[in-house]
Amino acid sequence: MAIQFARRISIQRLNDKNDKNHHKNIIYEPTKLNDGPNEYSILWNQIIISWMKGIITDEISLRRQYDDTIIVYFSDYIIYEIDTLINKFNIGYKVISLYYDTFRLKYYKGLIHSLEKLKNIILLTCLIIKNE
């Protein structure tokens, strides 16, 4: 699976509206990287959604969906995001919307256990990859 974003998007803004030549004073800026979901947000959202929909069920299915390099590199970050979700549910959140695919993660009795299991699968997968 590959995610590709345009690198040459820009925002136009005028320097000074009071300037007679304001149409000549256009500044081009790159779009903000933190303006909505980035590749990393989409990645961890996809992993959560794939887990919840039964696409990822174990270490083998995780490795089928994602390259080993990506799993190892992002594992700590993804586990952090899962911990953040768990903490939100522990303080009373009932629903959390994810960026990717407008997915809504709804609390149910076994959800925290399920997310903990996903964390363990990610950790175990990393150990397997590093020992190969």
Image (cartoon, helix red, strand yellow):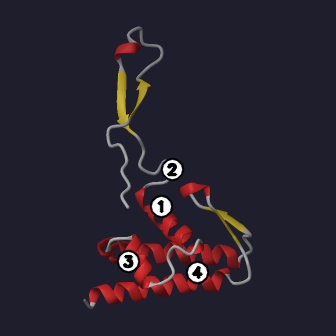
Image quadrant in which the N terminus is located: bottom left
Residue in the picture at 74% in, 74% down: 92
Q: Position of residue 17 (x, y in %)?
A: 47, 17
For the residue labelled by badge 4, is the local secondary structure a helix, a strand or a loop? helix
Residue 23 lies left or right of residue 131; in this view the side is right
Q: The disc labelled 3 sits on which kind of residue? A: Arg
Which label belongs to residue 63? 3
Question: Hey, which residue is sitting farthest top in the picture?
Answer: 20
Is 78 in front, or is 21? 78
Q: Does 22 appear above or below 95? A: above
Real-space Cα separation, disc 4 to disc 2, in angstroms: 24 Å
Real-space Cα separation, disc 4 to disc 3, in angstroms: 18 Å
Q: Position of residue 94 (x, y in %)?
A: 74, 70
**Mark 4 — residue?**
115
Image quadrant of residue 67?
bottom left
Tell which circle, 2 or 1, labels the residue nearer the N-terminal end: 2
**Mark 1 — residue?**
41
